[in-house]
């Protein structure tokens, strides 16, 4: 049996592990009720004022609860122990090239352009658009705000290909003013109506008239506490909450993503980042846990294709 023959098997292993962990979330939250309440109370403090103690509480408790969820398989049967060991080998917190300060801006921007090219070629944007349509529910008109969006590739796609029967007002934001400027200029040249703004994805309270926040292929750049803070703010600002679409952490996804990017965009930084990104990715159960301690009441997680997973969270 070749390594290629094992790829689907590794994907099934990751999904089995996800289902097992998801089933244990209620017990974990019951056992850690006080810690979950501390996280929620700290988030509520941060809604009002910047507070380093509250931010540290969210970061530390969210990381600890996530680690607890990931570690429960140590006493389970052999198949789950194997899945847990494999997940430990896949996971990394290594910084991506795009996140390293010493990498020249020209390399980062070229990598971002190629990433948009790959997402378009493999149909990722089309899949995400269908997910966005589901998250909007019955809304025929909606303001969608894309967070941590880089140069706005997904918003650009939505401006050209909105979900069938929908009329969208689009905002694309990122913390990097260079990315925001590039996206705004491209949209202007293409005649697309997209509002671009510089914004921290953890500072959403002043966002106006947003129906749904989305965050695509960016959440793996954030720590557990930052994800909790983003979810908490988003679900209390936007009636339709937050749709997160990110990479599914599995050995099959690492192999498949690395090979696909090497073919479609053979540029070393994006090939390396693609491999690291999947290893930094999430299992759906982990996003569900973070959404629950962020205060979300309506939560839906699912896998999308072979390499992505999604969370839709609402208050």
Image (tube, grey):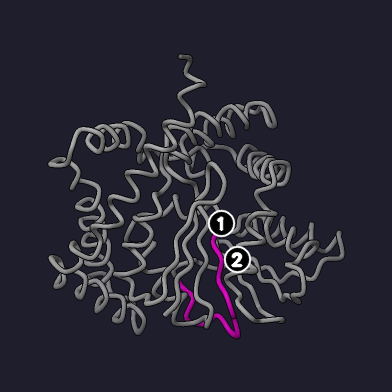
Q: Which mark is residue 216?
A: 1
Task: Describe the element under mark 2 as helix, strand or loop.
Answer: strand
In whole angstroms, how far apart are the C-alphas of marks 1 and 2?
Answer: 8 Å
Q: Which mark is residue 137?
A: none
The quadrant of the image that shows the N terminus is: top left
Badge 1, how many Cα within 10 Å: few under 14, some, many 20+? many
Q: Which residue is mark 2?
A: 146
Horizontal and vertical percent for residue 293?
29, 69
Give the main secondary structure of the magenta stretch.
Answer: loop
Q: Is residue 212 magenta?
A: yes
Asked if one can make out residue 101 in the rendered structure from this viewpoint, the answer is yes
Tell me which corner region of the image, top left, top right, bottom left or bottom right, holds residue 27: bottom left
Horizontal and vertical percent for residue 141?
71, 81
Residue 87, relative to residue 204: is it above or below? above
Residue 80, relative to residue 51: is it above or below? above
Q: Residue at x 27, y 57 (%)?
A: 23
Q: Residue at x 42, y 38 (%)?
A: 12
96 and 103: which one is in front? 96
Badge 2, how many Cα within 10 Å: few under 14, some, many 20+? many
**Dot 1 and dot 2 residues touching (CB under 8 Å):** yes
Horizontal and vertical percent for residue 134?
60, 69
Please provide the residue range marked out in magenta: 203-215
Task: Describe the element under mark 1 as helix, strand or loop.
Answer: strand
Residue 163, relative to residue 307: is it above or below? below
Q: Residue at x 65, y 54 (%)?
A: 127
Tell me which corner region of the image, top left, top right, bottom left or bottom right, holds residue 251: top left
């Amino acid at each position: 049996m070749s390594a290629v023959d094992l790829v689907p098997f590794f994907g099934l292993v990751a999904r089995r592990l996800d289902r097992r962990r998801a089933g244990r979330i209620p017990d974990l939250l019951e056992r850690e009720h006080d810690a979950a309440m501390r996280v929620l109370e700290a988030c509520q403090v941060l809604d009002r004022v910047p507070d380093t103690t509250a931010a540290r509480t969210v970061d530390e408790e969210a990381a600890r609860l996530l680690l607890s969820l990931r570690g429960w398989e140590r006493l389970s049967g052999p198949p789950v122990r194997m899945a847990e060991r494999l997940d430990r080998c896949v996971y990394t917190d290594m910084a991506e090239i795009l996140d390293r300060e010493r990498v020249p801006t020209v390399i980062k921007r070229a990598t971002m352009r190629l990433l948009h090219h790959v997402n378009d070629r493999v149909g990722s944007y089309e899949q995400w658009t269908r997910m966005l349509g589901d998250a909007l529910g019955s809304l025929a008109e909606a303001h969608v705000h894309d967070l941590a969006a880089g140069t706005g590739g997904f918003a650009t796609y939505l401006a050209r290909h909105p979900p069938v029967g929908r009329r969208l007002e689009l905002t694309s934001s990122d913390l990097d003013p260079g990315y925001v400027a590039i996206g705004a200029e491209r949209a202007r040249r293409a005649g697309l109506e997209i509002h671009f703004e510089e914004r921290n994805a953890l500072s959403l309270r002043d966002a106006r008239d947003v129906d749904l926040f989305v965050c695509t292929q960016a959440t793996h750049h954030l720590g557990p506490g930052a994800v909790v803070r983003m979810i908490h703010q988003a679900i209390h600002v936007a009636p339709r909450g937050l749709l997160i679409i990110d990479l599914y952490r599995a050995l099959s996804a690492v192999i498949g993503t690395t090979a696909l990017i090497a073919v479609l965009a053979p540029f070393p930084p994006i090939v390396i980042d693609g491999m690291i990104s999947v290893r930094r990715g999430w299992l759906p159960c982990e996003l569900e846990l973070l959404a629950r301690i962020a205060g979300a009441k309506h939560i839906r997680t699912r896998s999308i294709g072979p390499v992505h997973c999604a969370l839709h969270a609402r208050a």
